[in-house]
Image (cartoon, grey):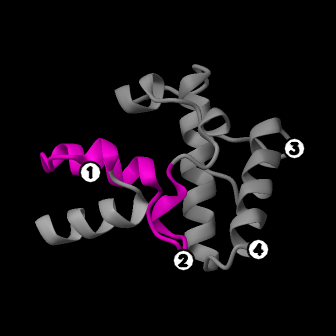
Amino acid sequence: MPPAGVKKGTKRARQYEHIKDSQLEQGASESRAEEIAARTVNKERARAGESRQRSQTSTNDMSSSRRGGQRSGTNREKGRTRDQLYNEAKKLNIDGRSKMNKAQLERAVDRKK
């Protein structure tokens, strides 16, 4: 069931069902799939000015479709990407990080934590 304010048969309702089905295929539970779909649809509605309330993060953040898989490094078997590790190393102020490969960055970040 799409979130409140989304009429049946509209683009947003179809988007909700598509996202929910995709999440279920990826192994998410029914409730988690519904939550992710509702949040995504609500965020897109806020960006398009279709909702009464909207948060600053909804309107200023990169759109879900444009973002793609940029935040997908946490749920993969291989773990974080090199860029994610580099940014974490930068936050931790690790010296020599620009010359490190992924494995070296991972070790340095894990040691520093």
| Residue wearing tag 2 | 77
Residue at figure coordinates x 69%, y 67% from the top left: 23
Number of numbered discs on residues: 4
Locate the C terminus and report the quarter of the image it occupies. bottom left
3 vs 1, front mark:
1
The answer for how far apart the CA atoms under marks 3 and 4 are is 22 Å
Front disc: 2 or 3? 2
Sequence-wise first label, 2 or 3: 3
Q: CA distance from mark 3 to mark 1?
A: 44 Å
Q: Which residue is mark 1?
A: 88
**Which of label 2 and label 4 is nearer to you?**
2
Q: Residues within 10 Å of mark 2 (few under 14, many from 20)?
A: few
Tag on residue 25? 4
**Which of the two labelled residues, at mark 1 and mark 2, occupies the earlier sequence position?**
2
Label 1 element class: helix
98 is within the stretch colored magenta: yes
Q: Residues within 10 Å of mark 1 (few under 14, many from 20)?
A: some
